[in-house]
């Protein structure tokens, strides 16, 4: 019942893995190393291939509960053995689907994730729950598995590309219903197919409100028994406290409400199909939305809404003698996800990680690193300018136009004009160059309005002379108040970021020459604005990769420096060897090689982990680490962000994920608390240039008790010469070849 919006082109997916994960490189299993003989090469290849096949099949089990983990999947498989008939049916179904996928040459990247095979697995479990194994049921299981795979591919293509929606377990719900309906006409199957289900007496020792929860949890795997439910609950608790909490809250919210509506709590707690409440709460509150108080509230609302649908489905489906399966879960979750996407709810998870805790950690750090709005533009000028009016400005930036900025130029005394300011030419900003803050196509130009004499404004043409550009990222930027006949671009023209658009003027509703810039979702002049941030500017020698400068402050634009750009330009197969020191003693060797993930993201591969990096808005970033290599985490701490320019004493800040500095129970505890109050446990990184090639920094968190000093020395050619983070030091081995 997972949710991946996987892409249906038989090529490596663009960074989209299980559960909608955009973790780069998720599907890059790597190639086996070389051997001395052909026989050993063949044996190693066969072993690796078999391992990949088994891993993919086992992952199908974990995908049912929003995980993509072979170990977790193996545990779930072992739990299904509580009923061998169900377990074997599930295995047969998923293997049939897997074999058919291989037959039609389905790409390994998609197949090995488990995304396309968890629905066939559920179909097999459903058939195994109703009928005991025989030649007839094996045929039905195989047919259902293949049919479910086909439907998964078709529905995924339709829902993802048209609505950006996950397919969840909809293919299973459809195929299981069809199978149950069709089987009613199979006389031989009905005569000897049904079998009685054994169950333990443990449920009689538990109160109904507790045994009902465990039975519902077990029903997710078509095992409506207490013991499997307890085992599944423990797995969820060990993997994610957030999902465990949502499962409990979702079940009891929905069941208690159902009891109030029906007047029978005994009947409500006996209904095993209340597992839909569990899945809805987990999906809304912990998977598709970033875990937060608001997300939890929406999850509860979704569960309450689903109580009506679940009861209606039971009445309708019972007419045909079949259960409603996961249809309420699919319908409610899809509806909420679609609507929340349409209204641009800020808590919709853009990157879904392995657990809700990791998604939350990534979101909090990422929103500080790249801007909460996820939309950045460059400043529309060069040199030093003054922020005259920002978001929610007291004059004109109100209501639908609250997300906008006005800029002027002031002198050392804070004056925007020389002399009396009676003429336009007296203003420092007048006829200064205005540059494109984005790359895109010009969709609207107004250029012939006159500049207002000082002391007058044009109320009829509020926006004055203007240029509207459509960004490749599907939004628009409007720049207003150009000087009369100064615009140098035309409608339909493509412009690059930094291209000359025209000159600053005083047209429209403008009391003095200034630049007005806003981002908007629509093309029309003066459309409602949307949030954005500016990239790459300097304020008081502090560099901001993105942000919103305060009003009445002076900022300066920055351009990348070619030399540092070159040194931070890594090529595929670049290799670096570092001697690792601790307390002045060499303890290890770290070998890094530059590789590329299927989505085009580059990473340093150490053999034990990956360190993803790239360039974003003229800043070099280390995005995140993957794997268990502690050395990579220390490198991440030392240089998470590097401006592609150098200025003595220039400083900058960054925010690191909690998981990058602490591990174990302490990490899990604070990540859980962070879902209730963002930044409760925050990790700040402060860095500054102390020389042309030297960067000093610190990583601190009062809540976590972290205080780590860092030191980085850039190499004269490429990369880093020396890195120090806390007790670890990494020295480049100059005897090794960098590029081969």
Image: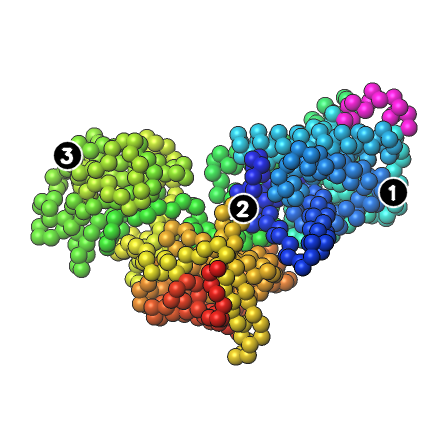
Which quadrant of the view contains residue 673? bottom right
- From mark 2 to mark 1, how far is it between C-alphas? 47 Å
Please provide the residue range marked out in magenta.
179-192
Q: Tell me the number on the disc at residue 199.
A: 1
Which quadrant of the view contains residue 720? bottom left
Name which of mark 3 and mark 1 comes first in the sequence: 1
Q: Which residue is mark 3?
A: 450
What residue is rendered at 77% in x and 43% in y? 218
Q: How many numbered badges does the structure rendering display?
A: 3
Q: Is residue 175 visible?
A: yes
Dividing the image into 4 quarters, which one contains the N terminus? top right
Tell me where residue 436 appears, x and y as whole percent.
Answer: 28, 43
413 relative to 589 in the view: left or right: left
Q: Which residue is mark 2?
A: 598
Which quadrant of the view contains residue 396? top left
Q: Tell me the number on the disc at residue 410.
A: none
């Amino acid at each position: 019942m997972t949710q991946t919006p996987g892409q249906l082109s038989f090529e490596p997916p663009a960074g989209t893995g299980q559960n909608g994960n955009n973790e780069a490189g998720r599907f890059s299993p790597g190639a086996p190393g070389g051997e001395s003989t052909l026989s050993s090469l063949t044996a190693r290849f066969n072993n690796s291939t078999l391992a990949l096949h088994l891993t993919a099949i086992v992952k199908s089990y974990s995908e049912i509960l929003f995980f993509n983990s072979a170990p977790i999947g193996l545990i779930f498989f072992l739990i299904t053995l509580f009923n061998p008939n169900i377990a074997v049916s599930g295995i047969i179904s998923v293997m049939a689907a897997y074999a058919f996928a291989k037959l039609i040459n389905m790409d390994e990247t998609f197949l090995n994730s488990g995304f396309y095979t968890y629905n066939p697995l559920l179909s097999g479990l459903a058939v195994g729950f109703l009928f005991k194994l025989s030649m007839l049921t094996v045929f039905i299981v195989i047919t259902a598995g293949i049919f479910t795979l086909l439907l998964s591919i078709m529905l995924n293509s339709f829902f993802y590309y048209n609505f950006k929606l996950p397919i969840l377990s909809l293919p299973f719900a459809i195929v299981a219903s069809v199978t149950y309906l069709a089987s009613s006409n199979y006389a031989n199957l009905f005569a000897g197919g049904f079998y009685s289900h054994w169950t333990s007496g443990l449920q009689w020792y538990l109160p109904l409100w507790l045994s009902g929860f465990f039975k519902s949890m077990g029903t997710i795997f078509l095992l409506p028994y207490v013991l499997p439910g307890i085992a599944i609950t423990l797995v969820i608790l060990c993997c994610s406290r957030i999902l465990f909490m949502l499962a409990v809250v979702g079940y009891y919210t929905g069941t208690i409400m159902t009891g109030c509506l029906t007047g029978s709590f005994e009947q409500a707690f006996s209904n095993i199909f209340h597992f839909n409440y569990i899945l809805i709460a987990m999906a809304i509150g912990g998977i598709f939305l970033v875990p937060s108080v608001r997300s939890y509230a929406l999850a509860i609302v979704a569960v309450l809404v689903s109580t009506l649908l679940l009861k209606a489905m039971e009445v309708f489906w019972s007419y045909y003698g079949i259960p409603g399966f996961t249809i309420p879960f699919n319908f409610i979750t899809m509806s909420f996800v679609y609507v929340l996407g349409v209204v641009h709810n800020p808590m919709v998870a853009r990157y879904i990680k392995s657990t809700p805790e990791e998604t939350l950690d990534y979101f909090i750090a990422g929103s500080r690193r790249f801007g909460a709005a996820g939309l950045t533009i460059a400043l529309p000028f060069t040199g030093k300018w003054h922020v005259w009016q920002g978001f929610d400005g007291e004059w004109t930036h109100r209501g639908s136009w609250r997300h906008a900025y006005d800029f002027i130029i002031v002198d050392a005394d804070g004056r925007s004009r020389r002399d009396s300011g009676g003429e336009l030419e007296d203003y420092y900003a007048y006829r200064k160059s205005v540059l494109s803050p984005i790359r895109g196509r010009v969709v609207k130009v107004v250029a012939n309005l006159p500049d207002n004499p000082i002391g007058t404004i044009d109320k009829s043409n509020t926006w004055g002379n203007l240029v509207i550009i459509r960004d490749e990222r599907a939004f628009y930027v409007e720049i207003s108040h150009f000087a009369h006949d100064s615009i140098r671009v035309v409608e339909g023209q493509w412009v690059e970021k930094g291209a000359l658009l025209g000159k600053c003027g005083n047209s429209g509703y403008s009391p003095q020459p200034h630049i007005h810039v806003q981002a908007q979702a629509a093309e029309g002049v003066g459309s409602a604005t949307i949030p954005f941030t500016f990239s790459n500017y300097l304020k008081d020698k502090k560099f901001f990769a993105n942000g919103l400068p305060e009003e009445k402050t002076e900022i300066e634009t920055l351009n990348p420096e070619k030399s540092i750009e070159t040194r931070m330009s890594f090529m595929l197969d670049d290799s670096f060897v570092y001697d690792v020191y601790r307390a002045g003693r060499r303890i290890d060797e770290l070998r890094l090689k530059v590789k590329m993930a299927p989505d085009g993201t580059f990473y340093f591969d150490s053999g034990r982990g990956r360190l993803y990096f790239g360039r974003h808005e003229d800043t070099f970033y280390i995005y995140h680490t993957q794997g268990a290599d502690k050395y990579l985490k220390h490198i991440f701490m030392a240089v998470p962000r590097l401006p592609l320019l150098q200025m003595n004493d220039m400083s900058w800040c960054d925010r690191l994920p909690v998981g990058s500095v602490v591990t174990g129970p302490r990490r899990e505890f604070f990540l859980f608390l962070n879902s209730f109050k963002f930044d409760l446990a925050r990790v700040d990184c402060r860095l500054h240039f102390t020389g042309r090639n030297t960067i000093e920094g610190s990583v601190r968190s009062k809540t976590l008790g972290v205080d780590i000093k860092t030191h980085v020395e850039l190499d004269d050619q490429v990369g880093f010469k020396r890195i120090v983070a806390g007790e670890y030091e990494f020295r480049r081995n100059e005897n090794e070849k960098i590029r081969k």
